[in-house]
Amino acid sequence: MSFVALAAAATVLAGCGGPSDADVKWADGLCGSISTFTDAVKTQPNFDQSNPDSAIQGLEDYLGTASTAVQSSIDSMDKLGPSPINGGDQVVTQLKTTLTSVKSSFDQARQKLDGVDTSNPTAITGALTDALSPLQELSKIDTSGLNGNADINAAASKAANCQALQQQNG
């Protein structure tokens, strides 16, 4: 499962310049917020594919964990406070909108799996197709506006959480 949208958001990490300590601290907090989500989703669902009950439950658990992590990222961004970097608040707003959409996709997918009749192969196939469909749309989320702020890029290039996030998303 690819989470290109947030990996692209993490590329606010390239740049140069002399950001202030406050700028770097804020960017570090922003990247820390993003990493809450990316850390959770980089672990693939754990289940026995030969056991339909286990497969459905494993995927439901994964989606629940990912949804909770997305909400934690959003909550963490709410605690960042106003950005000392011009345009930073707009970036946070766009990220929160993107993450809210991601969370909604996870929640919808999880609901589609809830209560599926695991003794019916056709029901399982249909539920999995329905559940995975919104997740495949995540790669189409437009994050192009997140990469254009040179001041955030400069601060992020000095922030430990941003450097770790960039390495993680390679």
Image (spheres, helix red, strand yellow):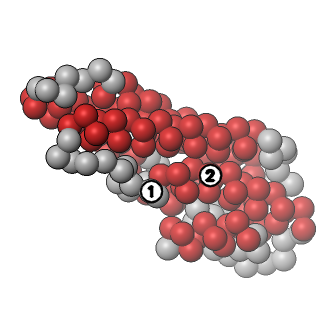
Of labels 2 and 1, earlier in sequence is: 2
Where is residue 56 shown, x and y percent of the image? 29, 36
The amino acid marked with disc number 1 is Thr
Would residue 13 be visible to someone looking at this image? Answer: no
- Across and down, in percent, residue 15 comes to 68, 75
- What residue is disc 2 on? 36
x and y percent of residue 154 in the render? Answer: 74, 72
> As drawn, which residue projects farthest toward the right?
21
Identify residue for label 1: 43
Could you tell me how far apart the alpha carbons at marks 2 and 1 are, in whole angstroms?
A: 12 Å
Q: Is residue 140 left or right of residue 159?
A: left
Mark 1, secondary structure of its residue = loop
Residue 67 visible, this orientation: yes
Q: Name which residue lies at 86% across and 54% down.
A: 84
Of residues 117 and 17, the one nearer the viewer is 117
Q: Quadrant of the rendered structure where residue 109 is?
A: top left
Q: Is residue 149 above or below residue 105?
A: below
User: Is residue 132 found left or right of 106 in the rendered image?
Assistant: left
Residue 159 at x, y = what percent? Answer: 76, 70
Question: Which residue is nearer to you in this view: 52 or 146?
Answer: 52
Residue located 33% across and 24% down the image: 114
Which of the 4 image quarters holds residue 132? top left
In the depicted view, which residue is nearer to us: 31 or 88? 31
